[in-house]
């Protein structure tokens, strides 16, 4: 898995890091990169699939928390899309900070 690979990288900062792995774990990988100081201060982090269907995902937290339910939420694919959108949204928010 990517987490194991990141842990095995030499402890010297890289000019560029490209993430192309499990979208739902991008936050874990970003935390590892930050914790291990793997990216130079002026380095570039490139991440694949941070857009969802071509858009920056906006996540409606009421749907995840069950405050609202709809027929679409019953659909397995819709729930999967919500999980992915939330993971990408949270990742983008963390990058922005």
Image (tube, rainbow, N blue to C red):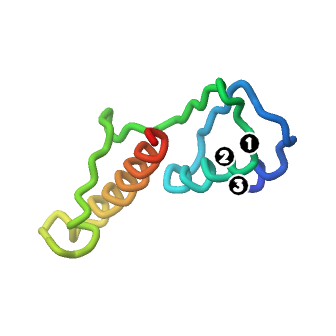
Where's residue 45, x and y in %? 60, 31
Q: Are marks 2 and 3 in contact (CB under 8 Å)?
A: no
In the image, is 28 to the left or to the right of 37?
Answer: left
Query: Residue 73, located in which quarter of the rendered image?
Result: bottom left
| Label ID, residue 34 | 2
Task: Please tell me which residue is depicted at 44% across the width and 39% down the height of the picture.
Answer: 96
Label 1: state its secondary structure. Answer: loop
Q: Residues within 10 Å of mark 3 (few under 14, many from 20)?
A: some
Query: Residue 12, located in which quarter of the rendered image?
Result: top right
Q: Where is mark 3, residue-wise?
A: 3
Q: Where is mark 1, residue-wise?
A: 37
For discs 3 and 1, the disc positioned in front in the rendered view: 1
In the image, is 19 to the left or to the right of 68?
Answer: right
Q: Reply above or below: 47 against 59.
A: above
In the image, is 96 to the left or to the right of 4?
Answer: left
Q: CA distance from mark 3 to mark 1?
A: 15 Å
Task: Please tell me which residue is depicted at 30% across the width and 35% down the height of the picture.
Answer: 55
Q: Nearer the viewer, residue 53 or 6?
A: 6
Where's residue 50, x and y in %? 44, 39
Q: CA distance from mark 2 to mark 3?
A: 13 Å
Label 3: state its secondary structure. Answer: helix
Where's residue 13, x and y in %? 78, 33
| Label ID, residue 25 | none
Q: Are marks 3 and 1 in contact (CB under 8 Å)?
A: no
Where's residue 79, x and y in %? 30, 64
């Amino acid at each position: 898995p990517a987490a194991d690979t990141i842990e095995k990288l030499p402890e010297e900062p890289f000019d560029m890091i490209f993430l192309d792995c499990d979208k739902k774990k991008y936050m874990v990988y970003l935390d590892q990169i930050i914790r291990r100081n793997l990216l130079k201060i002026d380095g570039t982090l490139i991440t694949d699939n941070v857009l969802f269907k071509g858009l920056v995902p906006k996540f409606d937290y009421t749907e995840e928390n069950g405050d609202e339910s709809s027929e679409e939420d019953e659909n397995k694919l819709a729930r999967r899309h919500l999980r992915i959108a939330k993971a990408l949204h949270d990742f983008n928010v963390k990058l922005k900070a």
